[in-house]
Image (cartoon, grey):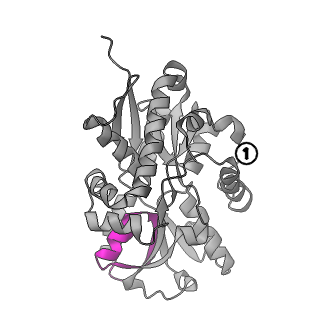
Amino acid sequence: MTEKPVIKVGHLKITDHLILGVTDLKQKKGKEVFEHCTLKTVLKNGWNEVADALANGSIDGAFILAPTAMDLFKSGVGIKLILFTHKSGSVLVKSKAANIEKIEDFAGKAVLIPYQLSVHNMLFHRLLSEKGLKPGTSNEPGVDVVLEVMAPMMMNDAIKYDEEGEIGGFIVAEPIGSQAIAGGLCEEMCLSKDLWPNHPCCVFVVRNEIIGKNPDGVQELTTSLVRSGMSIDAQPSAAAAIGADFLGQDKAIVERVLTTPADRITTGELFPVIEDLAVIQDYMCDIMKKMQNKIDLEKFVDTQFAKIAGAK
């Protein structure tokens, strides 16, 4: 019997990537059997690591920030966007040490973001701009709120050791924010779904040569991920137990993320919406100037697998 080809998929320990954890567990327990591939999940510590591994081909696919994936595609990395991995699911928290009551109070503070090319950066930029505040890096002139990029896993410690309250807070994927709230470090400011309802954030991308060599394996994996997403929405408590293990988090924190409110993060509708990706690209190119030269989203997104998988 020939060995099934392995598909290595990079990810972080965030709720945005929980469908991968559910599919991985279904495989390990034999509840689903792939005929055409073997899934190998590859944990990374931050977005730089995910992007680099995808670019150099040491992984075959990844759960990655949509704008980062667009940028990789633009720079010539041969990938296709196959599926959204969730909708919504991030949170803006304020540090208790920073005495923040309203958005304007972030002026003069640093705020942590997971990556420059992230929906988090876009949403926070829009939120600050509406209040007349200019976000930017510390070396830009006239900046009101300094944005510092930090790997999500390090954000809680950064707040913990910032006794002076110089860091106003952070905007990031769950369960990092809920973990900071449960630990008494932060308070919730707003949910990302309230800034843009049902917004995309992380996407599942696969390298072109894998799609070319093993489309059946990519299809099996995509179909399983879509089913995993539907099962998380249908049974959040059971999913929280899986998530606690996959994300290395307290089950109560993961369950809170999946249930309070019910649409804090959703995983039942993962079909790639090109119009939503265009909103991100237009804002990050035209308003923020974080991306140069737009990509042809029709060439970047490959919906054939999501269609066959029955993604909504």
Determine whether 78 is above or below 96 in the image: above
Whether residue 161 can be seen here = no
Residue 312 or 201: which is nearer the viewer? 312
Confirm whether the magenta stretch covers residue 190. Answer: no
Residue occupying image coordinates x 48% and y 43%? 226
Residue type pointed to by label 1: Asn
Horizontal placement of 72 versus 297: left or right? left
Confirm whether the magenta stretch covers residue 163. Answer: yes
Horizontal placement of 225 versus 3: left or right? right
Residue occupying image coordinates x 26% and y 36%? 28
Horizontal placement of 242 versus 95: left or right? left
Residue extending farthest top: 1
Q: Position of residue 177 (x, y in %)?
A: 39, 69
Q: Secondary structure at mark 1?
A: loop
Residue occupying image coordinates x 44% and y 44%? 227
Q: Position of residue 58 (x, y in %)?
A: 41, 30
Q: Position of residue 57 (x, y in %)?
A: 46, 29
Residue 36 or 69: which is nearer the viewer? 36
Determine whether 242 is above or below 259 in the image: above
Whether residue 125 can be seen here = yes
Horizontal placement of 249 versus 198: left or right? left
Q: Return the residue at label 1.
A: 293
Determine whether 149 is above or below 308 in the image: below
Residue 131 or 230: which is nearer the viewer? 230
Q: Residues within 10 Å of mark 1 (few under 14, many from 20)?
A: few
In the image, the segment drawn in magenta is: 162-187
In this rendering, the count of numbered labels is 1
- The quarter of the rendered structure image containing the N terminus is top left
Residue 198 figure quarter:
bottom right
Residue extending farthest front: 234
Residue occupying image coordinates x 38% and y 56%? 14
Q: Position of residue 250 (x, y in %)?
A: 25, 64
